[in-house]
Image (tube, helix red, strand yellow):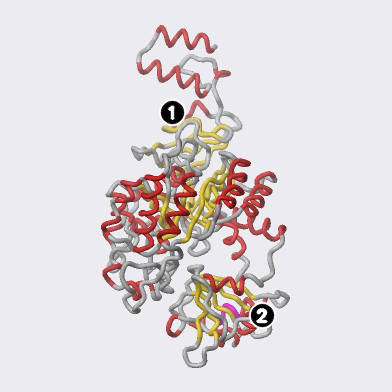
Amino acid sequence: MTRGILRAVKQVNTPVAMMCTLWVVVAGAACDGAPQADRQVADLMIVNGRVFTADEQGTVAQAVAVAGNKVVRVGTDQELAALRGPQTRIIDAHGATVTPGFNDSHVHFLSGGETLGDVDLAGLTTLAQVQDAIRDFAATKADAAWVKGRGWLYSPFPGGSPTKAQLDAIVADRPAVMTCYDGHSIWVNSKALAMAGITKDTPNPTNGVVVKDPTTGEPTGHLKESATDLVTAIMPKPTGADRRAALRTAVAHAHRFGVTSVQNAGGDPEEMALYDEARRAGELQVRTYLAFSARAGTTEADLDRMDATRKQFGDDPTLKTGAVKIYADGVIESRTAALLAPYQNSPSAGSPNLSAGELNRLVTMVDKRGWQIWIHAIGDRAIRMSLDAFERAAVDNPAPAGGRRHRIEHIETIDAADIPRFARLGVIASQQPMHVPLGDMNSAHPSGPWPDNLGPDRASRAWAWKSIHDAGGRLTFGSDWPVAPLSPGQGIWVATARTGPPNAADQKLPMRDVISGYTRWPAYASFEDQRKGTLAPGMLADLVVLSADILARPPANAAGVVVETTIFDGKVVYQKPK
């Protein structure tokens, strides 16, 4: 049959005939008059939808057909009707938006799964609410050696700093540790402080703060940045079985929100091995791109070990590595982000975690090995240092064959002079819409010290994703889960419906650009845009069916839209309960 087709190509080379003939070759379907036996039958088909393909043109179709784990055709219901067979599963989208599977470009996936079993303090706005939640949780965990929680805001605590006395009042018999929503501070009780040996004589570790009472000098129970390691180092380590269970929980949680790919911000070969066990067992139904962690003092020998793991996995479509993450600074809430000028309410401007010389050395060394580099940079000084380091590496090292695609993570406040440098240097802006402190929504931090610390001018330049986009820079969006909810739907709403002041309403983006920020652009950011992130023949069949057409809704009405169906690798892995 193929020879006959090739003869037909030579004999009839009109555009219409060529398109029809190529479809026969590629998909096994037939033009009018071809035998039914030669037609490919779809395993799954989504019809009656608003299929946003996320291609460069922003094409919207009506239906998409899947065979095996690949998309075979996108078009109208009528155009795809010939691919229906007796066993084809038909999903009626009822006019709702269908997109490529969501790709969270910044997540802490395993720790997110682990925290789902802890007390959830997110969104609690009074000390009484926080204490009640911990008290009730501790009562249900009478046999737990440690009481753990996550998500507290600064605003419920006088001065924005929690104390051991507040935690001792509800948990005194065993150690308790509560992680702040931003992941950069913990709140512990007296038992935990004693077990960790933290006293009035304990010095601040490098890049960390043991908060102490200004009168007595005693530790208050609030630990910032690297000081958190003093307690986490003595906590019981989860078993391999515990970690596998947490990973399974995280995968199921991701499917609920339409997430079919994640980019894990920081890990090591041990964590990669855990993911690989899950992959071989068929449990890793979320495509994972893992960035290894590096810090001041990282050596060529450290990179040798990372290289060995990278070569082991290559370009596997389910699990791969190829990135190294560096922390340039802390966070604005605890005034550990590095700024160009002092904080609004402090003489300090924060300090970078590395000197400019060490950051340049590290970036140049890692870049020379052909690794992608992610730099956590929240303050405008840290962002400038990161761009400078990337610029220096591009001068010192030849460009790798596949390009660099280096990234800066977070970018919470930026100097206007640095915005065009993203496009000029080819640096990707990786941002998390749910970090925006909108007081009228379920944001990661609806209130607290963020705007007060920055002041109105810098706050008005916060999360400048539209400015970066309009200047030609590439964006990719994520959640930073468990810092913020693992919900692209909520992030999409924030990015399209920003209100101000001081939340930079002029930075909101059109709906189609934002959806691309959770689909096509993340695929580019992990060097996988040739196999996922858009809906076209030959692309991986990872898809999401939403509950309504968000392309036609005003942004303010998109908040209640949820995921109806998640498809991973051509198979339905989640359906919203009826």
| Amino acid bearing label 2 | Met
Secondary structure mostly seen in magenta is helix
Image height check: is 482 above or below 538?
Answer: below
Start-end of magenta stretch: 131-135
Q: Position of residue 238 (x, y in %)?
A: 69, 64
Q: Position of residue 145 (x, y in %)?
A: 70, 75
Image height check: is 578 above or below 34?
Answer: below
Quadrant for the N terminus, please.
top right
- Distance (Cα) linking label 2 and label 1: 68 Å
Please name whichever residue, 309 or 434, is drawn nearer the observer in this view of the structure. 309
- At 68% from the left and 56% from the top, the residue drawn is 244
| Amino acid bearing label 1 | Glu
Q: Position of residue 245 (x, y in %)?
A: 68, 58
- The magenta stretch spans residue 413: no
Please give the label number shown on residue 79: 1
Q: Element type at marker 1?
A: helix
Between discs 2 and 1, the one toward the N terminus: 1
- At 39% from the left and 75% from the top, the residue drawn is 449
Please name whichever residue, 551 or 442, is drawn nearer the observer in this view of the structure. 442
Please name whichever residue, 208 or 520, is drawn nearer the observer in this view of the structure. 208
Q: Are marks 2 and 1 in contact (CB under 8 Å)?
A: no
Residue under label 2: 195
Q: Element type at marker 2?
A: helix
Please give the label number shown on residue 102: none
| Horizontal arrangement in the rendering, residue 238 relative to residue 221 (left or right) | right
| Whether residue 477 can be seen here | yes
